[in-house]
Image (cartoon, helix red, strand yellow):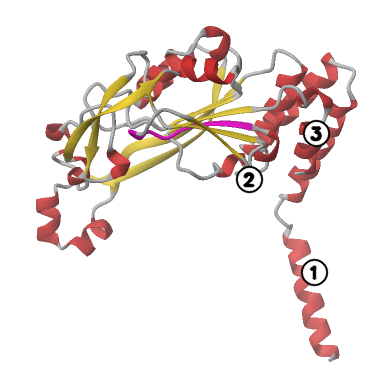
Amino acid sequence: MKIIKTILESEIFSNQPPVLFDIGASGEINQKWKSIAPYSICVAFDADDREFKITEQTGSGYKKLYSFNRIVTIDNSGNAPFHLTSSPFCSSLLEPDPEKLKPWIFNKLFQVEKTIILPSMTIAQALDQLKLNYVDWFKTDTQGTDLRLFRNLSSNISDNILAAEFEPGIIDAYKDEDKLFRLMEEMQGKQFWLSSMDVKGVQRISPEYADQIGGKFTKRIIRKSPGWAEVTYLRSTGRDKRQLLLLTIFALIEAQYGFALELADQGIQRYKDDLFSECKKAIWSKINSEKPKTPLVILKRQFNKLFSKIND
């Protein structure tokens, strides 16, 4: 949307651009951040055992992209055991729980092939290295430790986060795992509301039974059960003009147009800035553009097409 570009090119963001934190980064721009990436600082973490370095990349799609080759932990010991599993997407700081995973079709993906020691760091250390004192959008997907990382943030950081994105487990996959119900309990007591929850699933059937059914038929016959979820929280309101504007952008990214209207009205009431009126106008335009066409309009189009063919 054009209004996003207008807001982020305003003077208020020139010296304080959006800061996006991605723990468990995939190496690509988060699709949700595509429209704001050129104006934003992204801090991403990708663990490996090379010599410590901070990489500042250009041409990444972001205004600035800082990459840390470190595991993120809640302590500053400098290293941590990391369990490499059959599927790299299941590798974690936490040890998988084979007994609890037995009934699930994908349990072999969690088999630990080896445990290695990887260098680690805390979020506070990363912020200190970059001389950053705020985070606007906090995203983490760490296979079981999302909530503890969020809890470990200092209050001056966590109290100013506007969007928080997690991928907690529902079933028992790892020992001492941060589960969805704990996350929801934690966020309930904070000034956030749940914007979206995309529940992912898997079949509860052991690989042995699945083999007897026939691999290609199992997924058609056995329904998926909830296994984990992708959840996004938005802060209920902004403390100042910058937060209100940026939270409005985040609401638009989340397709929460009703909430975006609330924020625009708050801005109009609290500040004498025409930008909030522009926001409100743009939000209504977006809403109207996405309204489904009425049956009368569709019928009229069909009639015009038919009439045109008859005349031809």
- Is residue 97 toward the left or the right of residue 299 in the image? left
Q: How far apart are marks 2 and 3 (CA)?
A: 19 Å
Whether label 3 touches label 1, CB < 8 Å: no
| Mark nearer the N terminus (3 vs 1) | 3
- Mark 2 = which residue? 59
61 over 83 or under it: above or below: below
Q: Can residue 283 be seen in this view?
A: no
> 158 and 267: which one is in front?
158
Image quarter for residue 83? top left
Contact, mark 2 vs mark 1 (Cβ under 8 Å):
no
Of the numbered discs 2 and 3, the one sitting upstream in the chain is 3
Q: Which type of secondary structure does the marked residue at label 1 adopt?
A: helix
Q: Mark 3 points at which residue?
A: 9
Which residue carries the number 1 mark?
300
Dot 2 alpha-carbon crowd within 10 angstroms: few under 14, some 14 to 19, many 20 or more: few
Work out how far the residue at label 3 is from the one at label 1, CA to CA, in angstroms. Answer: 42 Å
Looking at this view, name the residue that lies furthest to the front: 51
Circle 2 sits in a helix, a strand or a loop, which is it?
Answer: loop
- Residue at 74% from the left image edge and 14% from the top image edge: 240
Amino acid under disc 1: Lys
> Left or right: where does residue 268 sit relative to residue 62?
right
In this rendered view, identify the residue nearer to me: 182 or 84. 84
Please provide the residue range marked out in magenta.
Answer: 41-49
The Cα–Cα distance between marks 2 and 1, rounded to whole angstroms, is 48 Å
Looking at the picture, tell me which residue is in the foreground, 64 or 159: 64
Q: Residue 88 at x, y = what percent?
A: 29, 43
Q: Which residue lies furthest to the top in this view?
A: 155
Q: Magenta span has 179?
A: no
